[in-house]
Structures are given as structure tokens and as C-alpha cells.
Image: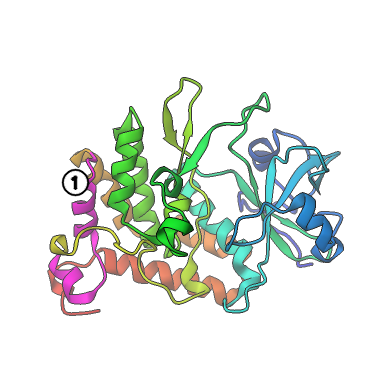
Amino acid sequence: MKKIEVCPGTLATGFDTYSPQCLRRLFDGKKVCHIMDFSLDDVTADIIASLNRISISGVQEKLSAVVNKGKIILTPEGKSGRYIIKPIPDYKHLRYIDNIPANEHLTMQIANQVYKINTATNALAFFADGRPAYITKRFDYRDDGSKIKQDDFASIAGKTEKNNGKDFKYSGSYEDIAKLLRQNVSAWQVEMTKFFTLVVFNYLFSNGDAHLKNFSLQETIDGDYTLTPAYDLMNTSIHIDDSDFALQKGLIPKEEYSEIYNNTSHPCKEDFITFGNRIGVIPKKVDTIIEMFSKENTFVYELIERSFLDARCKRMYLRSYQERLQRFNRGSFFSNFN
């Protein structure tokens, strides 16, 4: 296994395992080893199928885990897991699949550390054979162990494979999500600002898989609903050729496209301003968020460099960010360029 010189959680330098800050956030301050005592090959198909897999049709294999005596272990039968482990997927059609855990980890860290987006707490862990896995703490349990009611926007919209076809989670638009958010959340303006921020982030960091099931609401202790922490953030352009937006109807109606969007088939910040205004984000908040994302951020570069991506994928990730930022900041001068 490659020598570790940064925290596999926060990517802070000077650590060969989880930093104290990571341990506090992810493991409630307990000392936990970043290396698991088993490899994925050690887990039999029967065990995965019957006990430890979180079965979600059509998505990456996920294993349920707990911490026991300073070690990350698979959830024993009859127990409730508090962590989700996502190994390297067995998807032959994806490029650079060994980098998928590091990609998700890096993207989640950028969202949280650079842009202060509330994200699921996460890190990398390593199987006994050295292969990486993404690990995240479940946010659908309270401290007392009770389950928190939670629904993704496919469920809220009543969309299933049966009534909307196999691509049901990609149907609709981000405005559709915003309308459902407004209908289901009392303090909707606060949550709408968070949603708007996340949509802009997903574009700038090439998350082409931000579909209906990757946005959710959860019930508060007072019975209201708020957005869950962000999850499943990844620069998908490294692994597959995809479009700017996961949802089939995209960001805004075509009649609202900017001249640049019409000419290049890619949105710029003017289109995101239109989107923010249409979904009811306070204009001053829209301006602040757009300005934040318009600036090239050197901390993004630092986190990419410290990440567990290999050298080629680091270059691809950086180039992707620079290209999206250039598109985002285009004005009329660039309207004839793709």
C-alpha cells in the first residue's frame, strides 16, 4: 500500500492515519484504524447478499459497517450499521475505476471545506490488500439510535421505474425539485439557498449524476423538513462522457437560455442567476453565491494535489474544474466559442 502522508479524511498534511479532527467528525472522537482487517475478496457472495449489502438496484455496491475496538468491520447480523462503505465498483464501462473512491472523497471535501456545503461526513478507508474504499457516516440516525424519516425527491415526486420507466430518477428538471422543496419545507428559503448552491457546485465540478435520488429531505425533531447533507458528489467526467446536467430537462426552460447557452450549448453564470431567481432565492444571496463560485480558488488546487487520485486523474480533475470555471464566467465576448 502506498505510504500515507495526508489524513485520509480531511486531506490535512502531516498525518499517516486519520487526524484528530477527522476522528471527532467521523468516529465521535474514537481512535480508529484506516486499514480494515479484511479484503473485499474475503467477503463471500453469500454474506454480502444476505447481511451487508445495502441493495439499491442499478447503483454501486455498498456495504454496511460499524466500528468495533478501533476497527471498521462489516455490520454483524441483527445490528444496525452506522457507516456505508463503497468499494471500487465492478463497472467495466467506466474509465479509471480504481480512482472512484478518491474522486468522491475529494469532491465531498472540496464541497465542505472550500464552499462550506453541509456534506455527509466521509473519508477513505483501505482494505487489507491496500485497495481504497469510500466510507461515510450515515446521517439518518439520531444520537439515541432512532431512525430519522427521510425521502429522496424521486419518492417525493412519486416517480418509480414502474410509472416513469427505467430512467425515472433522471426525469424532470432542477426547477421541479425546487417546486417540491417549496411545497414540503416551511423554512423553504433557507433550504432553497442550500439547494441552489449545490446545483452550481455540481456544474462547476462536473457532477453529471446529480439526479432526483441524490437530493433528499429529512424530518427534524420539530416535525419540519430540511435538506439532508449533500452526498454522492463526484466529478463524473473523469469516468464517463456525460452531459452538463443529469436531469433530462436540465436547469431552466430553453426559452430562458442566455445567448451564450444558446450559442454554445453550455450554461454560464447568467443562466444560473436566472435559475436562482426563478426558484425564489433572494437576489442578494444569488449574487453572493455566484460571486463565490466565479473566483478561481487556490484551495481547490491544494486539495486536488493532496488527494488520493493518481497523477493522471489529478490532472484531469484540475483541467475539468478550469474548463467549467471558464464556461461559467463567459460573457458576450466568448459567445461564439464552445
Is-magenta flag for residue 172?
Answer: no
Q: Nearer the viewer, residue 222 or 70?
A: 222
- Does 270 sit above or below residue 229? below
Residue 143 position within the rendered picture, expressed as x and y whole percent measured from the top left: 65, 26
- Does 224 sit above or below residue 165? above
Q: Which span is picked out in magenta?
A: 258-281
Secondary structure type for disc 1: helix
Residue 209 position within the rendered picture, expressed as x and y whole percent measured from the top left: 45, 62
Instruction: Identify the image's colour scheme: rainbow, by chain, secondary structure or one colour.
Output: rainbow
Q: Which residue is mark 1?
A: 277
- 48 vs 273, left or right, is right
Residue at the spot x=44%, y=77% of the render? Answer: 241
Residue at the spot x=53%, y=51% of the render? Answer: 109
Splitting the image into 4 quarters, where does residue 126 fall? bottom right
Is-magenta flag for residue 266?
Answer: yes
- 225 vs 39, left or right, is left
- 291 vs 121, left or right, is left
Splitting the image into 4 quarters, where does residue 163 fall? bottom left
How packed mark 1 is, by other alpha carbons closer than 10 Å (few <14, some 14-19, many 20 or more), is some
- Does 65 sit above or below residue 133? above
Say how many tags the image has.
Answer: 1
- Regarding residue 210, the answer to whether it shows in the image is no
Q: Amino acid at mark 1?
A: Asn
Residue at the spot x=73%, y=38% of the render? Answer: 80
Residue 289 position within the rendered picture, expressed as x and y whole percent measured from the top left: 29, 47
Q: Quadrant of the C terminus?
A: bottom left
- Does 251 sit above or below residue 335? above
Q: Main secondary structure of the magenta part?
A: helix
Splitting the image into 4 quarters, where does residue 325 fall? bottom left
